[in-house]
Image (cartoon, rainbow, N blue to C red):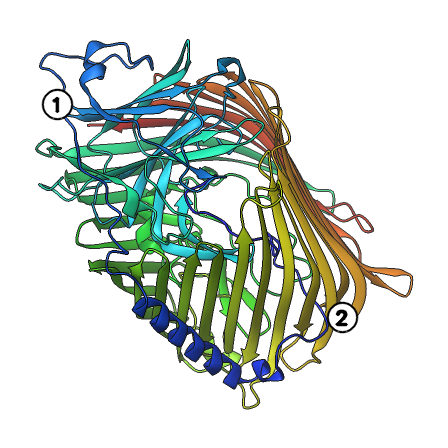
Amino acid sequence: MTIGYKYAAGGGRSGRTRSRSRLFHPGWRTVGGARWLLRAMLLWFAMAVAALPADAHDPAAAPLVVGLLPAGVAPLLDGRLDEPWWAEAALIDTFYEVDPGDRLPPPVRTEIRLAVDARYLYIGVRAFDPSPQAIRAPILRRDDSGDDADKVTIYIDALGNRRVAQIFEVSASGSIGDGLFSEDTGSADEGGATLGVEDMSPNFRYRSAAARFEGGWSAELAIPFSTLRYETGDAKSWGVLVARNYPREQAYYMMSGPVPRDSACTLCWATPLAGLQPPQYQLTLQGTASLSHRTVRERQADGGTAAQGQDQAGLDLKLSWRADTHADLTLRPDFSQVEIDAPQLAGNTRYAIYFPEKRQFFLESADLLESPLPVLRTRSLAAPDWGLRLTHRGPVEGTVLIVRDAPAGSILLPAPSYTDERLREQPSTALLMRMRTQLGDATIGALHSQRRYEGALGRNEVSGVDAAWSPAPSHRLDFQWLQSRSTALQAERGVPDTGSAWQLRWFHRAPSLSVDASVRRVDAGFRADNGFVERADVRQTAWSASIYQRPWFGLQEVGLTMGDQRSLALDGDRSLLDARTAAGAYATLPRLTRLAVEPWVRVQQRATTTGLVHEMQRWQANLSSMPSSWWSGLWLQIEGGEMLDVERDRIGRGGAFDSWARWQPHAHLQVQGEFRRLAIGGHGQAWFDERAWRLLVLWHLGPDQYLRWIDQRRRVRRQGLSDSGEAARTLSWQYRWRSDWLIDVGMTTQTSLRVNADRGARSRELFVKATWEFDR
């Protein structure tokens, strides 16, 4: 379980759920519906804020004094906490069960110890367990420990603003994870409001070790001050929040702060750290140098072959002269840092699909690039030759990033009912600027984005402001306004050079109620070439609500969900483009099991902006569970009913199936599988059938090396056309030597499938990569 709680159920990961039949007034189809929603949001928000008690936003605990290690002590990091100085270190031993209970006494005891010296913050963990033989300690890759492992997660708010925290995680096996947690990022997940998001992509430099003792397991972490992001000269407002995952027949999640289920701020419950005096910061240079060799042999569709070799050197440097200011340089970052993306079903949608960022240069203070509208997305920088970045953290914080991008990737040209994509055939220079500050309970921000193309193509610019306000732990209001100007490709598309976009969103949590409502408008001329805006010339409204009760007749939680989403074209008639209205119920059981059904889902959808509005009725069900210690994860989603074949603009009967499972048959072996399918047909014929699957097998040869096998495929069958698809298989070995060297050796085979035609193209790549991490 993550810090960001997820209430209610219903909608799931696939955005393909739609339906037929009426629940809401026809006025929702008009712009008046959007105005009504906006007025209702503001009125409800004002009434809720006016009713708040005066002390509703003061959850802070008493400060914890963190002392220095005794002089001459050289800590031994073995995970055992058996050195005498640990007994004198600052102690956190008050925890609360926050799931499935709500701030109840925890089922097991947890102790956290903290101490510092001139270079490190030391954290000790003692996780007591009445049945040590039941401890779940699989060996996992970095950032891969889910709800199926015994682990402790530490959130350190070194900036002291209770909005952002660095994550440091260690499991009972010694597997680690790290990332960023941001309060100012929210989403609507499974019908309810989810506040606070964990991003486990960033990697920080720290050391850890885990061990067993007679009554449980323990761990030690040494986090360099050079890894933490804090305001120079001020440590009075640091905060720490600790979470423990305890998966058994009943899975428990405990935290060191009494975080209520209706709180819209999690870090507000962090324990303040007092007496912490970070050392005088010294000039620090960290870097990662890589050298790779690839040999590629390609077989063309006509039967010919071609072979080529490629050597590439890459370099990432981070220069820090203050704890709150960092400069980064990258030269030809290796895109193999981006793991093979999971296959997506894309054959029956007209919108672009987004994949997350995993290259470390772009992940420094990644939370700064987040904003309500996704106009800053570094995956749009597909092939950087070089990049420079300056980042400052503090009361007023920001980042400036400039990248020279080689011709690669696509330019997204948004429209009301589809996303057009043009190959980026010219080199370009991208500039991303972001600034924000806190004013009381509000976070205020501004951004500027620019992409200049060489030659006569032109440029794209986006500027704007945004704000997030939490007047109480149970409320949050987000707003953003943006303006763009484009001189590239707009005239030939027949859209204006300029356009604006704005969004207003409100989250609310109560003890048995969760609400999320939003309004967004994007003009026809709006475009963000450094972001991911897939629709324009559209107004979108959405709301979702869930009412829940826990416990209820032996069930951990039951709830009812409902919601509505709709998009209107910004033409004279404000014509409806698509809409989805749904109602359902869910229940949670032991083993992290959650069953949700939406027996009534109504969808209205056009295949094109000027096409007919099709009305469809569907149903949907999903199941998630952790069946056993060796079957550590299961997720299923099924939907059926009427579906739109967007290519042929016709309604048929069909279904969609989406699944994910993970098995851990041995402490060193992990198997993970995904399978997705979408099928539509009518009159006894199959119109469309798309399938995608992925199999990942990991064998850990030890704590420092593993073998990995990935097999993923995608196939599309459409009536009257040849089958198409692609397949990729990768076998690789990774070995970490002396903590600062990383060796990767592997082979990848890629094939484009043409089942009913000539055989497709095929390539085979052999690669060797050496990476050296240094710190000076």
From what the image shows, is residue 72 above or below residue 473?
above
Given residues 350 and 28, the one toward you in this image is 28
Residue depicted at 66% across the width and 61% down the height: 17
* Residue 131 badge: none
> To which residue does mark 1 refer?
68
Q: Position of residue 175 (x, y in %)?
A: 43, 24
Residue depicted at 36% across the width and 72% down the height: 47
Q: Residues within 10 Å of mark 1 (few under 14, many from 20)?
A: some
| Left or right of residue 541, residue 451 in this image | left
Label 1 and label 2: CA atoms lie apart by 70 Å
Q: Position of residue 560 (x, y in %)?
A: 60, 57
From what the image shows, is residue 67 above or below residue 490?
above
Mark 1 or mark 2: name the one nearer the start of the chain.
1
| Left or right of residue 773, residue 553 in this image | right
Q: Position of residue 561 (x, y in %)?
A: 59, 59
Q: Amino acid at mark 1?
A: Leu
Q: Position of residue 208 (x, y in %)?
A: 33, 21
Given residues 23 and 409, the one toward you in this image is 23
